[in-house]
């Protein structure tokens, strides 16, 4: 009987819809879960004067928007890039701008001790204070420089420790691609597998910027924004840091091909750290070396142009070691108070002509790579100011990136997340649909029994 068949198909369709609704409600708090639904289709009529053959479940629907997913992944890359470097910038800014540990503070104290010595150039305690201040200033410069070296090593180590998890995620995406392709070919729902893959892609996107392209079989193919492949079907790439000649280089191995990458351009956390090392930390280190080198050279040259207490030529006080990461600047360990050449050539002890020239080094113009020509006593202030601007800009961009990421997540949720109230309404509607079809079956049974009784 057509009426019974139609009602039975309606009851079965309602039951399938209720099962889908129950799955959605059960996973309403599951992170990354994409809600599902059923596509109901009318079963076409098979003969004349037939309204149709009930309803069928055409397919299971997965409510997702590829564009919104891509936006969410891109925003995660940008947020990862900015947030990863902010702790380093904050630490640098705090230490370099500290009123008692900055390079400027060390210079100020040193030149104060020279000015104090001008009152009595022959005073041994005042001369000793000059040497003590010189040593203290050197240690402060070394302390700042050591911090940049420590951050260089720390950020490189942090980049290296990201790679095992990143490679594992890429391998898992490739494995899920293969599973989605095989399971999907049998007509079984792959929604849960795709959810797992999307979460892995989001995790990868926070570490490197990715472009995602889908294949006809449901595979997601990933590549870096610079074009190198990360995942193609069931094949995944492997990233590693290599150090040929002692220089850390990021490489990507895919199938039988190896690529050398510019890690400052890969985006995400990995790219953010590399960009920080190359465009903030390294120039800052070079600037500190420039300051220490220019100062020590100028001061030593003036000092050697004067006369010591015994009338002999002056000798260098400062020793520069640009290749050292722990002792960039130091004082000659054998230097004594008698070696301070405060007098001009041919002048007796007590003359402070050369001492005044030494004091004048503070206002000498020096060349600093990232700043150009600046006065010595302004160099550190300008470095700190430049660093503060970078930090503030990064914080502002990070705040914007956080907002964009939140908006991207909200947009994704508007399409893919489970709304319990909406699902509750669906549950009631499909329950009513099921009960109505069961009522039709009951009516059909009554009509059939009445027909049979007519022939008794």
Image (cartoon, grey):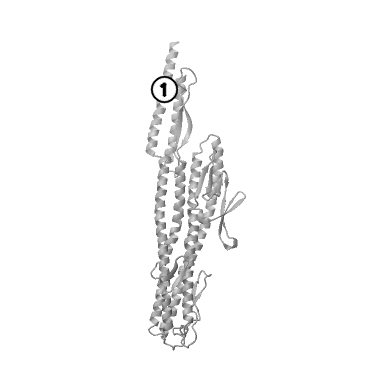
Crowd rating for badge 1 (residues with CA inside 10 Å; few <14, some 14–19, many 20+):
some
Q: Where, by quadrant of the figure, is residue 416 drawn?
A: top left
Q: Is residue 375 above or below residue 195?
A: below
Which residue shows up at 42% across the image and 46% down it? 408
Which residue shows up at 44% across the image and 16% down it? 448
Q: Is residue 352 left or right of residue 185?
A: left
Helix, strand or loop at disc 1? helix
Question: Relative to the observer, which residue lies in front, 30 or 408?
Answer: 408
Question: Relative to the observer, which residue lies in front, 114 or 425?
Answer: 114
Q: Is residue 31 above or below residue 345?
A: above
Which residue shows up at 48% across the image and 30% down it? 58
Q: Is residue 111 above or below residue 387?
A: below
Give coordinates of residue 455: x percent, y percent: 45, 10
Residue position marked by numbered label 1 in the rendering: 440
Residue 102 in sight: no
Give coordinates of residue 415: x percent, y percent: 42, 40
Question: Relative to the observer, which residue lies in front, 340 or 173?
Answer: 340
The quadrant of the image that shows the C terminus is top left
Give coordinates of residue 407: x percent, y percent: 40, 46
Q: What is the residue that sits farthest to the right in this orientation?
A: 256
Question: Relative to the observer, which residue lies in front, 353 or 238?
Answer: 353
Residue 62 in sight: yes
Marks counted in the figure total 1
Give coordinates of residue 178: x percent, y percent: 56, 42
């Amino acid at each position: 009987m057509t009426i019974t068949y139609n009602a039975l198909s309606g009851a079965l369709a309602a039951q399938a819809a209720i099962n889908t609704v129950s799955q959605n409600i059960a996973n309403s708090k599951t992170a990354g879960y994409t809600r599902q639904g059923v596509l109901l289709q009318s079963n076409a009529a098979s003969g004349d004067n037939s309204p149709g053959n009930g309803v069928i479940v055409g397919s299971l629907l997965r409510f997702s928007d590829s564009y919104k997913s891509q936006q969410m992944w891109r925003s995660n890359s940008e947020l990862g890039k900015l947030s990863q470097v902010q702790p380093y910038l904050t630490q640098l800014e705090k230490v370099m701008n500290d009123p008692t540990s900055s390079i400027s503070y060390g210079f100020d104290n040193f030149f104060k001790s020279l000015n104090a010595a001008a009152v009595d150039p022959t005073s041994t305690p005042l001369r000793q204070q000059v040497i003590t201040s010189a040593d203290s200033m050197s240690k402060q410069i070394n302390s700042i420089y050591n911090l940049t070296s420590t951050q260089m090593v720390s950020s490189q180590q942090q980049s290296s420790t990201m790679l095992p998890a990143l490679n594992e995620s890429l391998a898992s995406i490739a494995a899920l691609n293969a599973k989605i392709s095989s399971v999907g070919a049998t007509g079984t729902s792959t929604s849960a597998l795709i959810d797992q893959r999307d979460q892995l892609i989001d995790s990868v996107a926070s570490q490197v910027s990715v472009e995602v392209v889908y294949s006809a079989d449901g595979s997601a193919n990933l590549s870096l924004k610079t074009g190198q492949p990360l995942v193609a079907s069931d094949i995944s790439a492997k990233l590693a840091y290599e150090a040929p000649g002692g220089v850390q280089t990021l490489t990507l191995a895919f199938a039988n091909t190896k690529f050398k990458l510019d890690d400052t351009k890969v985006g995400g956390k990995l790219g953010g750290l590399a960009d920080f090392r190359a465009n903030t930390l390294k120039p800052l280190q070079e600037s500190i070396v420039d300051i220490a080198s220019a100062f020590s050279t100028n001061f030593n040259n003036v000092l050697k142009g004067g006369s010591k207490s015994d009338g002999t030529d002056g000798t260098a006080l400062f020793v520069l070691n640009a290749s050292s990461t722990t002792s960039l600047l130091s004082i000659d360990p054998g230097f004594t108070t008698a070696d301070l050449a405060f007098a001009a050539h041919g002048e007796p002890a007590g003359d402070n002509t050369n001492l005044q020239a030494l004091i004048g080094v503070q206002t000498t113009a020096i060349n600093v790579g990232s700043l150009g020509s600046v006065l010595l006593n302004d160099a550190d202030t300008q470095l700190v100011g430049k660093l503060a601007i970078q930090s503030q800009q990064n914080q502002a961009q990070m705040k914007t990136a956080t907002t964009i990421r939140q908006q991207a997540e909200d947009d994704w949720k508007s399409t893919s997340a489970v709304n319990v109230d909406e699902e509750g309404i669906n549950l009631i509607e499909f329950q009513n649909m099921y009960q109505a079809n069961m009522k039709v079956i009951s009516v059909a049974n009554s009509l059939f029994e009445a027909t049979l009784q007519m022939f008794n």
